[in-house]
Image (cartoon, rainbow, N blue to C red):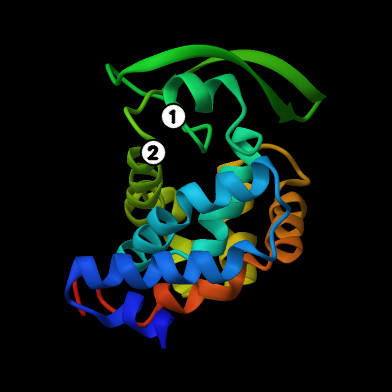
Amino acid sequence: ILTQVVRDARDPELRSRASTLLVQLAEHSWPADHRRSFLSNIANAAMESGRQHKIPPSIILAQAALESGWGRSRLAQRHHNLFGIKATGNQASAQFNTLEFGPKGAHIVSARFKTFRTARESILDHGVLLSSDHRYESTRSAGNNWRSFLAELAPTYASDPAYATRVSQIIERYDLDRWDAVSDGGRTPGQA
């Protein structure tokens, strides 16, 4: 019922209260350490972004955990970039070294990454990126099926050939797909 409220309610305050209750119900199943704290702090924003942008919240949560080292990377702590989203043009950015994979294997490169004021802002930007960028058009047909979504997303989003496996392991280990119905892939944006 709470998942339906998050997905369908028109009142943002009601959706927020329902998603807070869903997170409280899930917290006991997460380790009592930085991982629980991280998931608890971003789950509401992940559900709302999933709802708005038709992205399974499990994908949002697991990508954020993997890309940010559970919120402990310097990029996440100093610049609130939870997803390793690179900057383009004159976007506010910070320079960091990153591991990239190519035909000759792994190598370190310096790259500009977007900076955000808050983790929530990073999550919403990630949602806009995945829901509107032409590179991720094929992911949009997957609806709330996280496995299909990830299979389409991973080859474009990350150069790491094991990226999909790493994200999948996080989703499965922490049962993050429990709220994927809020993204109901058959809905149109703004409908509720």
Residue 3 position, x and y percent, is: 42, 80
- Disc 2 marks which amino acid? Ser
* Disc 1: which residue: 80
- Residue name at image x 73 percent, y 65 percent: 172
Indicate the quadrant where residue 15 lies: bottom left
**The N terminus lies in which quarter of the figure?**
bottom left
139 sits left or right of 190 in the view: right
Q: Is residue 15 above or below residue 127?
A: below
User: Are circles 1 and 2 on residues that touch, CB within 8 Å?
Assistant: yes
Residue 5 position, x and y percent, is: 32, 81
- Residue name at image x 48 percent, y 63 percent: 138
181 sits left or right of 52 in the view: right
Question: Dot 2: few (<14), some (14–19), or many (≥20) neighbours within 10 Å?
Answer: many
Residue 122 position, x and y percent, is: 39, 38
**The disc label shown at residue 122, or none:** 2
Indicate the quadrant where residue 46 lies: bottom left
Residue 18 position, x and y percent, is: 36, 73
- Residue name at image x 69 percent, y 26 percent: 100
* SS state under label 1: loop
